[in-house]
Image (cartoon, helix red, strand yellow):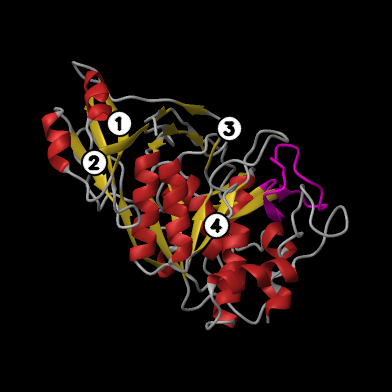
Amino acid sequence: MKKLIVIMMISILMLSALATAAGNPEKVRVFLEFKGKPDAGVVSQAGGRVLHSYALLENVLAVEVPANSLQGLLQNSNVVNVEYDAEAHASGKPAPSQPAQQLPWGVDKVDAELSNNTGLGVTVCVVDTGIDKDHPDLQANIVGGKNFVAKGATIDSTKWDDDNGHGTHVAGTIAAVDNTIGVVGVAPSASLLAAKVLNRQGSGYLSDVIAGIDYCVQSGAKVVSMSLGSSSDVQAFHNAVDAAYADGVLLVAAAGNDYGGAVSYPAAYDSVVAVSATDSNNNLASFSNVGPEVELAAPGVSILSTYKDGGYATLSGTSMATPHVSGVAALAIQANPLMSNVEVRALLQNTADDLGAVGKDNLFGYGLVDAELLN
């Protein structure tokens, strides 16, 4: 089969841009897929370096190599495919701080406060810009994190504190503590892991996102929450989420914010729960992507949650809808600890409040996720 270089992009709100690494000669970040065990020597011979190896993708390396070495890599008999890495962007507009605890309308809408469960004993991994380590509304539930974003040529794995805000906002919707201040999350006793794959500008490479998912799985997370997406179907990414699902993890991702566009990846993959966004009147959010892959809907308009530097912010997007589903999944897993991820997924579908056309549809999927019926 002819080898192909596939150029792809990912984004977690609206924007995306292809990126290559600077250097002389110009260097690029790519995935190398081997016939068998990856050969780091091939990378060294090409004048490059290995960025990541993966437990989920045993025959793939993420590497940085001179652009003029790509043709030689394609001609290597042990290299079966080369795909370009890509860059992602996040954005959001914060609102003033809210010191007194509120029940956010989205948490109320999915009936989380009516659940007999709190997510206790269930770990949710947030693949995003990190989580504010010291946030008073999150600190008690944070059990660890890891950074995958390089600064220069090095990666300090301990630097997973959120310097953007997006990841902390997602984490708060999932599991802000019920502690009289700020907000309360859908699953206020769930454990939070942070996989920081995006930098302070909200940008990051897909190879880092895969490494973050890998970390979540190896760390024992039951739910992986991904408020990110791609317009391109990239095989390495597809294989990684499929492998995580096969390992028993429930993966939840944003449908995308292209105002009715096609569901983005990884949400469009069969192994991932795709989430569209609704407003407080159960209408589809104007920005939400739609399609047959949409599985569940959740609140995503003017969502108040935690933010970086101990603050709070109101943001909108399918990025905000996704953690509502991730939190309800944590409640379902606590209530049904012997269920597989496949069974929990079916439970979320069967207990959703039907919206729009009767039955599953392209706007809301099976309907608005509902925590009350999980008891």
What amino acid is found at the position of numbered circle 3 in the picture? Met
Q: Earlier in the sequence, mark 3 or mark 1?
A: 3
Question: Residue 51, which numbered label?
Answer: 2
Q: How crowded is the residue under tag 1: few (<14 C-alpha within 10 Å), some, or many (20+)?
A: many
What amino acid is found at the position of numbered circle 4 in the picture? Ser
Judging depth in this view, the residue of 187 and 362 nearest the camera is 362
Q: Residue at x 75, y 43 (%)?
A: 285
Q: Earlier in the sequence, mark 3 or mark 4?
A: 3
Position above or below: 307 against 139: above
SS for tag 2?
strand
Q: Earlier in the sequence, mark 1 or mark 4?
A: 1
Determine the CA span between mark 3 and mark 2. 27 Å
Circle 1 sits on which residue? 29
In the current view of this chain or complex, which residue is farthest to the top? 24
Name the mark nearer the viewer: 1 or 4.
4
Determine the CA span between mark 2 and mark 4. 26 Å
Q: Is residue 127 visible in this depiction of the protein?
A: yes
Residue 310: where, in percent of width, then height? 45, 53
Left or right of 21? Residue 299 is right
Judging depth in this view, the residue of 135 and 127 nearest the camera is 127
Name the mark nearer the viewer: 3 or 1.
1
Q: Is residue 179 visible in this depiction of the protein?
A: no
Circle 4 sits on which residue? 271
Q: Is residue 265 magenta?
A: no
Q: Residue at x 34, y 50 (%)?
A: 211
**Pointers 1 and 2 in contact (CB under 8 A)?**
yes
Range covered by the magenta-colored residues = 277-302
Question: Residue 14, which numbered label?
Answer: 3
